[in-house]
Image (cartoon, rainbow, N blue to C red):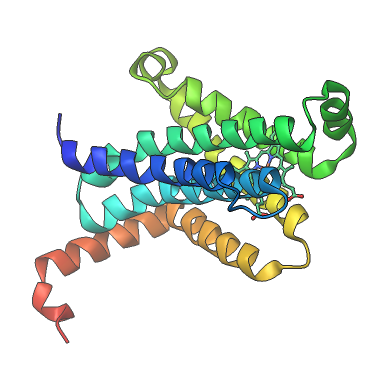
């Protein structure tokens, strides 16, 4: 397997935060409402992982290094794992395992409905991110996986509803998301590819 060390490093880097938060929760280091802090951290972690996953293709186009693409699927699956934990945390700590409360939230609270839609989208991508599905779905696989941009918009909208007054952090993620979306437009991707090739072929021109 290529990039083995790199893949393992990414695996370790993605698995440490939830373990660390769990440790903090067990030892009472998350304040008076550890459940809510866990849910918030996992939600934010999922959004960051989604953005990092989407950054892998532009990084590959810029640098031509195959390692970015080698970890793209793993990062996408990590994002899904964080979302599953985020959702479980919500059911356990915020809804207190009361199904009627979850169902009420799902029908009445717009930010929960938007989060649930993003979750369903991520679920569809996670179950089809294997060789069998790629072969079976053919061209449709690519179309399906473009859903990731709609999922990003839903996740950002979901977060906006939660943070509302504190827009600074949200704006930073929204801007990064917008830049990644722009980069995926084929014209911009073409320019990036040519710029990357130019700087690789003329390394002296970027020396200061
Ligand atoms: C059924 C699905 C989901 C449910 C029920 C849910 C529920 C929640 C809840 C209860 C909060 C905390 C609200 C508060 O602090 O008062 C939250 C925050 C958040 N969620 Fe979700 N969520 C879902 C899906 C998602 C998905 C798919 C993502 C991202 C990919 C996501 C990202 C976030 C973010 C970024 C926050 C804000 C964290 C912060 O305050 O820093 N959520 N969600």
The picture places residue 108, in percent across and down from the top left corner, at 90, 36
Left or right position of 135 against 96: left
Rendered view: 75 above or below 100: below
Rendered view: 7 above or below 166: above
Residue 74, by quadrant, is: top left
Q: Which of 133 and 81 lies nearest the eye of the viewer?
A: 81
Q: Which of 11 and 171 lies nearest the eye of the viewer?
A: 11
Q: Quadrant of ligand 1?
A: top right
> Could you tell me if residue 57 is visible in this image?
yes
Q: Which of 80 and 145 lies nearest the eye of the viewer?
A: 80
The residue at the far front in this view is 27
At 14% from the left and 80% from the top, the residue drawn is: 205
The residue at the far bottom in this view is 208
At 58% from the left and 50% from the top, the residue drawn is: 44
At 60% from the left and 40% from the top, the residue drawn is: 151
The picture places residue 128, in percent across and down from the top left corner, at 46, 21
């Amino acid at each position: 397997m290529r990039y083995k060390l790199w893949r393992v490093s990414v695996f370790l880097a993605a698995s440490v935060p939830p373990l660390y938060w769990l440790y903090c929760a067990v030892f009472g280091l998350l304040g008076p409402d550890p459940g809510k802090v866990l849910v918030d951290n996992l939600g934010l972690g999922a959004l960051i992982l989604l953005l990092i996953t989407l950054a892998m293709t532009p990084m590959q186009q810029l640098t031509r290094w195959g390692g970015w693409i080698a970890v793209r699927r793993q990062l996408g699956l990590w994002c899904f794992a964080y979302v599953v934990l985020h959702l479980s945390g919500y059911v356990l700590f915020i809804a207190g395992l009361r199904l009627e409360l979850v169902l009420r939230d799902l029908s009445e609270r717009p930010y929960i409905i938007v989060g649930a839609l993003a979750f369903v989208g991520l679920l569809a991508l996670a179950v089809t991110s294997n060789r069998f599905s790629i072969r079976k779905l053919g061209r449709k696989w690519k179309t399906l996986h473009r859903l990731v941009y709609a999922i990003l918009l839903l996740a950002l909208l979901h977060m906006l509803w939660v943070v509302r007054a504190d827009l600074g952090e949200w704006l930073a993620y929204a801007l990064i998301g917008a830049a990644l979306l722009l980069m995926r437009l084929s014209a911009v991707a073409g320019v990036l590819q040519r710029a990357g090739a130019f700087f690789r072929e003329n390394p002296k021109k970027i020396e200061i």
